[in-house]
Amino acid sequence: MTALRQSIFGLIGALGLALAGMPALAASPVQEVQAHGVSAWLQSDPAVPVVAIAFQIEGGAATDPPTLQGRASLLADLLTEGAGEMDDRAFKERLANLSATISIQATQDGISGMLYTLSKNLPEAADMLGLALSAPRFDPAALERAQASHIAGLISARERPSRRAYRAFLETVFGSHPYARSVKGRVATLQKITADDLVAFREQRFGRDRLLVTVAGDVTPAGMKDALGRAFGALPEMAPGGPADLPTVALPSTPIRLLAEMAAPQSTIVFGGRGVPRNDPDWRAATVLMQIMGGGFGTRLMSEVREKRGLVYGISAGLTELDAAALVIGSASTNNATVAETVAVVEAEWARMAEQGPTAEELADAKAYITGSLPLALDSTSAIADTLLAIRTYNLPMDYLNRRAALIESVTLEEAAAVAKRLFRPDNLIFAVAGAPTGLTGWRPIAVKDDD
Amino acid sequence: MRARLRFSAILGLAAGLALASWLSAASAKVFGPTRYVLDNGLELVVVEDHRRPAVAHFIYYKVGAIDEQAGETGLAHFLEHLMFKGTAKTPPGAFSKAVARNGGQENAFTSRDMTGYYQIVAADRLRMVMEMEADRMTGLKLDEAVTLAERDVVLEERLSRVESRPEGILGEALNAALYLSHPYRRPIIGWRPEIERLTFVDAMAFYRKWYMPNNAVVVVAGDVKPEAVLQIARETYGAVPAGERPPAARFYEPEQHAARQVVLKDARVRQATWRRLYVAPPYRGAASEPYALDVLSEILGGDTGRLHKALVLEQKKALAVAFWYDGQGRDYGSAGLYGMPAAGVDLAALEAAFDAEIASILKDGVTEKQVLDAKQRLAAEAIIARDSLDGPARIIGGALAAGQTVEDIEAWPERIDAVDKAAVEAAARALFQINRSASGLLLPAGEGPS
């Protein structure tokens, strides 16, 4: 899944969680704070003396040219490896002595991150984030280390069936679209990326008009205004590169079966197809259906594949959304002798749901789970900031958390059955298997490349 | 996924508890828990956190892989899986379904010393989960078919966690090499031939032997009042009669005289790595040395630590290094070093670089400033530990189930604050004895020592 955006919504989809009515936030409503040309959503709560600032800057790995794959990911690593007057060691020591952490990652669609700090150190910690975003150094030694570390990570993962299966699946469904490429890049392209490439990327992409910010924890609106200036005030008003427009994805509409043969005692199976985007009227019903199909214990896939047959330790499937594509994606691992049986059970469950839809009891249970689970998932300051950021990323309104339960509750059995026919069509089920499975006939072999 | 939580994961939380020199040592409280013991011996701890109308309910049984008999490794973990298969009152899967229907989360985990189950639910659903958890404390009903299907699930779990991962295979061998005799040498998930022979008769016997209120710790954290939780606990867990708890077995590792080395060469390995484990003292029953090891791990490990500075930044011999200390064991703790070599550096050279840095600590010691900085950073972790619903319950439950006390947890600030340079250096000298270690080399096929 590393190639897909793992926003909180992605994770929520994968875990079968969803946003719902929020007693957890009711005590302190979300408010907008504006300062220094930056708008932040803030949920203020002084109970624990910590603050979490989540942010996303539009434009990520999908904007990397094919010759510079991995550029956004290297940049994300290097922003905290020395900035301003501080080299990498000085920067990290300063952060540690503030008891603050800054984590920054590239996704296909953006550069996202979080500052987490004791509230008493917020001004100084926000200064550090400001330096990371606006004055990173890209020292040669730090760049070399980041390249070596990325390359070692890619090489280490080469013989993992899970990586092979996900790569085969994503390369096939996305075809020539940039989403087909790994966020982490390739050995050959990583070696060629220079500090100038990173400087150019940052200067083109970073601007307050491409920035989303959300905050939770022990900070007042006044304190937050000050921190916004420190963290983001030095970014240009407009990113010169403009919007990171990506071509729309044309996902395949045939039931492809891919096999990457490699020596392994257990195969990984990745499966899925076209999903339903958030702005589609069917999205509410699709969310409920995916909870019924693959959301965790007691769902159809877990019951049929694990509980009844003992074929896997875990199996799940959910909706995943990127800026330019929506997918259903699921996975499981099973020993080589039971791959064919596991695939057959998933196919049968897909067909059964398409033909018969869910039962009334399943629908009611899934709605109850989805509407009840979000308040429980907002269990830490960072989880609240992350969830608010996901809402902003999807252009949803500030009170969306309060509306969500009603949206989910409004799904009817008839509607769910109709959407099931669309979502679980047999031609919307692509499988990619990596391992040494027995009994798969007619599957398209995927050459296992050694150059990524 | 329902799973054993790796011991170091539990430990990670507890180790993060070291405390604040700037908090007033006398008044500092970590969680401010309230502790009760029911008439049947069940220990109950409540932590108030009113930030949201939710509650985390954890039960820890003081039984783990350490309590298995020879030939039945994996039984504690297997039973953990089977605990979801229903009772006379609750059909298989109904407990999970009831939790999900209320939007709740649940899972379970097995470690060397304990087995835990938890649910996170709306605060007004606490009675429901306490009733169901109390019911399965003694009411489990199994049959052979269900047991056999679940055994296949565990074998798939073993394939995923261990056999499909060269680092998993090496880790298992390294752990078995670290302990010559102590049952910590067994893998928690069990050895495959022994898992394959576990039966539901074995599972039920183990269950009846160890699952009882007087062998359990319940921790409830969230939007609740202690007296109200006590009342519900009396009405649910309180109705389960105390059992005959077998005497707590203690096991003793003999004096270790020989350093051990384990080598795995595997065609699936593309990037060599090195690690070393040491036997270390546990938190249990100690008030100083483990806390000095917490400070030592902050000085040595992490991306501001001495190992990173020496091996990654200055000598450029490693791409990544780590040092950790895990003190949450009934009998022993452990500490570990890990390194991924830079291109062109072989594992012998990397190991020599680690040994040189350790030698420098033992010869020249640490600085006063390193100790002060480390204590200050550890202080913040105790505050951050309060910033989640379930974190406090995990920390308290894990510590109590391993033989620590509520007082030990609340005394963390003072004990970390009391660590000085001499204590860190003495703890390092006691820890870094090569004859009490096992080193592991993971290599691509055809490379390294033959």
Image: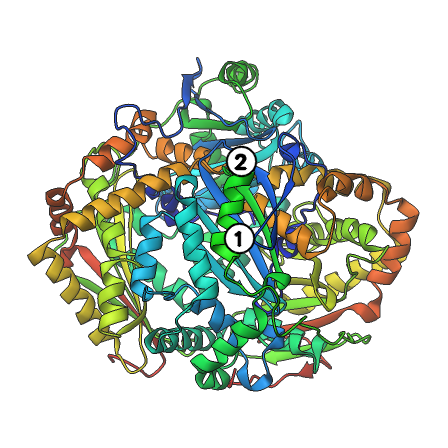
Q: Which residue is mark 2?
A: B118
Q: Residue furthest left?
A: B363
Residue B281 visible, this orientation: yes
Residue A246: assigned label = none
Is residue A163 depicted above or below B416 in this figure? Answer: below
| Three-letter residue code for mark 2 | Tyr
Query: Relative to residue B227, is residue B274 drawn left or right?
Result: left
Determine which residue is flagged by label 1: B154
Q: Quadrant of the N terminus of chain A?
A: bottom right
Q: Residue at x 42, y 17 (%)?
A: B36
**Classed neighbour count for the residue bearing mark 1: other residues with Cα under 10 Å, few (<14), some (14–19), many (≥20):** many
In the picture shown, does residue B245 fall above or below A232?
Answer: above
- Amino acid bearing label 1: Val
Location of residue B275 in the rendering, given as x and y in whole percent from the top left corner: 28, 64
Residue at 38%, 53% (x, y): give it: B187
Point out residue A305 in the picture as x, y percentages from the top left corner.
68, 56
